Amino acid sequence: MMPESKILGKKLRLRSTIFEKGSVSRQNLIKFTGLNERTVIRYADELKRQRLIYEKIDDTLRGRPKITYFSNSEKCCFLGIRLSAEKLFVTLVDINTYPIFVRNYSLSDCRTNQEIAARVFQMVGEVLREHSKYILGAAGIAYDITFNAKHSFPGLFAREFSRRYAHLQFEVHYNDDLFFWHFAQRTGVTGTLLGVVCGACFYMTLVSGGEITELKPGTMNHIRHFCVDETSRRKCSCGRTGCVNAEFSYDGVVERYHRYSSVPLCNNSRITVFNLIHHRALSGDKAAERTIEDYNRMLGMTLAEIERIERFDSVALMSNRRYEPSLIQKFYTAAAGTPAKPIMLCGSSNVEAIFYPALYMLHKVLYFQTEREYP
């Protein structure tokens, strides 16, 4: 079988030729690209399915009908739907990643999954009617923990979207998946990137070859209930103590600090607790220093356990805690028995993130990446 990179190179050559010339006959396309007729037909059919090109057949001439391909690139747009903290963001970007439209709507008055889905489709319908001169190439949908907590919502939404837009390629992802995909694109990370979130909960994803890839079945559940501290008194939802799920939480860090100090922390936002512990550590607070060291140790152990299950080449860590990559790598290496993978710290931007769903699908369409199917 031909290597995937060579196949992609041929597809990109064909796509670029049609886009640059605006219109080109099949015979000239064969000549310009150096591909055989069968290959040109197969790759052009992929572009037609994505509505990036269309063809016209002239059968008025004698002999074989003349087939000409026309580019739709100037009219094509990509839809992004982002659900975050009772907000709906709808975006449209063109094929050059330029924003055509962006708007946010409130979902605070929606009480059920069905009401949320109905509001989303109502808003999306209005946006698409308002921009009816554009051809929709694909749609990206993203949601955060607020909507993930509604259990069946992602699946319900995907089925309803598939019913309403039956011939449109779309994907549904967690917001953090798209953040790590964009991080990999922006930083030029090669190989497989493991993205890890350590905030309100523990979450991870893999990005490889420019797309979000699936974890092995059961990996996430195994890691969330992996014991990183046998001496912990904090109970997990599974009934055991010291699990990743219990320790890597807002309440977990407070309880950890109080193991070493009776001095109360602030009663403000839970997020400020992490900053407060960090500042106390800088001022010489031994309890804060031990708390920070504990979390670096537990994260290193967790990464070592992930490496036993999943293959990855580097780690990107998004967290509001003050981690030290060198310290994490020390504990990672000790737990794994092999050199730790490179670790990068990264931060998110909500302003940029609203465009990630549309940009991700634009990337997938332009690079001929396989469609995902939803039940």
Image (cartoon, grey):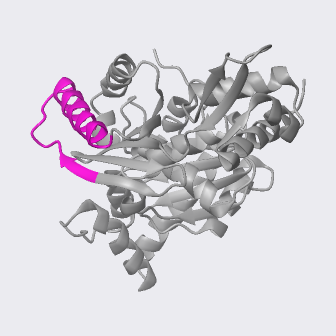
Residue 71 location, x and y as percent?
60, 40
Residue 292 at least partly seen: yes
Q: Is residue 132 left or right of residue 86?
A: right
Q: Where is residue 363? Give x, y as percent.
A: 59, 45
Residue 229 seen from this side: no
Is 33 on the left-hand or right-hand side of 229?
right
Q: Vertically, is 255 above or below 214?
A: below
Q: In the drawing, does residue 194 fall left or right of residue 263?
A: right
Q: Which residue lies at the image location 59% right of the left edge and 46% below the top edge?
A: 302
| x then y, percent, for residue 130 | 26, 42
Q: Name the residue at the left extreme.
A: 109
Span colored in magenta: 103-131
Q: Quadrant of residue 253?
A: bottom left
Classify 230 as above or below 154. below
Residue that appears at 82% across and 37% down: 10
Q: Nearer the viewer, residue 222 or 227?
A: 222
In the rendered image, residue 267, in percent from the top left (x then y), is placed at: 18, 66
Left or right of 77? Residue 128 is left
Q: Is residue 317 above or below residue 303?
A: below
Q: The C terminus is located in which quarter?
A: top left
Residue at 76% across / 36% down in the picture?
A: 11
Q: How many marks?
A: 0
